[in-house]
Amino acid sequence: MAENTVPVFDTLAVIGPGLIGSSVLRRAQAEGNLARKLIAVDQSPNVCARVAELGIADEVTTDAAAAAAQADCVMLCVPVGAMGPVAAQVVPAMKPGAILTDVGSTKVSVIEAISLHFGQMCLTCLRTPWQAQNFLARCRAGRFV
């Protein structure tokens, strides 16, 4: 991380460190300005072991809810068909004000799958965590888009 650079998030949890999720982790680690702490989550202990071996996350776990409880941003990097069940695990555990985003290629089906778990929470669609950075800056300045 560059000196005097304040990361957008304290903690980013990437659920599903496969091809896309691991790319996000690598980029976030290399850039150093997205999150102070990177958590990788996968249901497979073998995948977790490989992520730990690669050293692309500060913490690696199979417990999605525990990771979500720590995170300021939770990024779903799972197949679109798994978004609903994964959201059912992470949304109830998320802390107030945390951001949930995804890398799914379809938005309507993802929104339909995860919105069942939101209740009164606000849902904002952002295509990348870097768009989330801009969104957060506007929120902090009192300007919502």
Image (cartoon, helix red, strand yellow):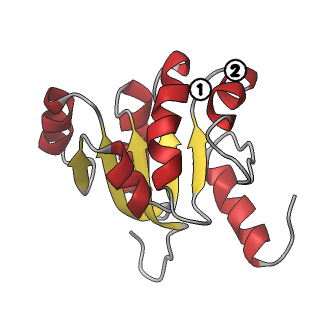
Q: Which residue is drawn at 38% across and 25% down?
A: 19
123 or 106, which lies in front?
123
Quarter holding residue 14: top left
Residue positioned most to the top: 81
Quarter holding residue 42: top left
Residue 26's place in the image compared with 17, above or below, is below
Residue 110's place in the image compared with 101, above or below, is above
Amino acid marked by disc 2: Ser
120 or 124, which lies in front?
120
Label 1 secondary element: loop
**Do we see residue 140 in this rendering?**
yes
Residue identifier under label 1: 104
- Location of residue 74 in the rendering, given as x and y in whole percent from the top left corner: 50, 49
- Contact (CB < 8 A) between labels 1 and 2? yes
- Location of residue 35 in the rendering, given as x and y in whole percent from the top left corner: 45, 63
Residue 104's place in the image compared with 134, above or below, is above
Classify mark 2: residues with Cα within 10 Å, few (<14), some (14-19) or many (20+).
some
Q: Residue 49 carries which label?
A: none
- The quadrant of the rendering that contains the C terminus is bottom right
Amino acid marked by disc 1: Gly
Residue identifier under label 2: 109
Q: Which residue is drawn at 66% across and 55% down?
A: 132
- Location of residue 115 in the rendering, given as x and y in whole percent from the top left corner: 69, 36
Residue 23's place in the image compared with 145, above or below, is above
Q: Residue at x 18, y 41 (%)?
A: 54
Classify mark 1: residues with Cα within 10 Å, few (<14), some (14-19) or many (20+).
some
- The quadrant of the rendering that contains the N terminus is bottom left
Viewer-side label of 1, 2: 2
